Image (tube, rainbow, N blue to C red):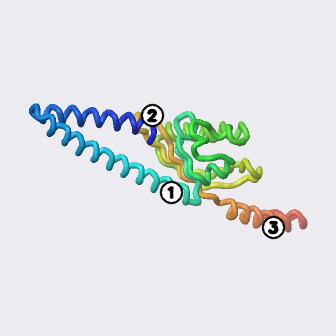
Amino acid sequence: MNETTASLSLQALRQCIDTAASSSNGDEASAWARVDRLAERLQQVEADLQEQSALLRTVLDESPDLIILKDQDGNFLLTNAPVARFYGSTPEAMVGKHDGDFGCPPEMAEAFRQNVQDIMARGETEIVYEESRDARTGRTSYFKSIKKPFAGPDGRPRILVIAHDITDLREAQLRVEEKGAAPAARDGSHR
C-alpha cells in the first residue's frame, strides 16, 4: 500500500469511528461492533484495490506495446515492463525521470518532451510516427504511437502513450526503397 492509500485508509477509519460513536447513542459495545464491521469493510476494500492494482500491472507488463504515462514536463509517472526493458531499467526506477536519464540522446529526449507538451497544449489525441534508441543495444527502433492527453486527478495535464513497435515493417520498407533506388542510380534514370 502506498502512502496516499494509507493516508486515505486512516482518514476513512477515523471517519468510520466518529460515525459509529455518534450513532451509538452512548452504547459503547454497539459503537465498537460498528467500528469492527467498518474496519472489516475497509480491509476488504483495500484487498480489492490491491487485487485490481496487481491485475492492472499484469495487463500492462504483458502487453508487447510500450505503455507510458507522463506529466507535463515529460517525466515518467508510470511505465510498463517493455518500456523499462527498452531503457535498461525497471518500471519503478523510471518514475520521476525522463527519457534523457536512460541513455536517450539529449536532442531526442528534448524532441520527445516538446512533442508531449505540444500535444497536451492542443488537447487532442494524436498518432505519431517516431524513432528511439534502445539503451542496451544502441539499435534504433521505430514506433507508431498513440498519444492521448488528459487531466490527472489533481487537474494537471498528463499524457498516455501507447507505442507499437513497427521496426520490422520500417526496415522492410527501407530495404524496398533502397532496392528501387539502386537500379536507378546504376543506369542514371530517375523515377
Which residue was labeled with disc 3? 179
Instruction: Tell which tag, 2 or 1, sits nearer the viewer.
Output: 1
Type of residue at label 2? Answer: Arg
* Sequence-first tag of 1 and 3: 1
Residue 3: percent from the left, percent from the top?
A: 44, 35
Residue 159 vs 154, above or below: the answer is below
Callout 1 crowding tier (Cα within 10 Å): few <14, some 14–19, many ≥20: few
Observer-nearest residue: 143 or 154?
154
Q: Residue at x 15, y 38 (%)?
A: 29
The secondary structure type at the circle numbered 3 is: helix
Type of residue at label 3? Answer: Lys
Callout 3 crowding tier (Cα within 10 Å): few <14, some 14–19, many ≥20: few
Label disc, if present, on residue 58 of the rendered structure: 1
Q: Residue at x 63, y 41 (%)?
A: 112
* Sequence-first tag of 2 and 3: 2
The secondary structure type at the circle numbered 1 is: helix
Instruction: Tell which tag, 1 or 3, sits nearer the viewer.
Output: 1
Residue 92: percent from the left, percent from the top?
A: 57, 43
Q: Is residue 127 visible?
A: no
Marks 2/1: CA–CA distance:
27 Å
Type of residue at label 1? Answer: Thr
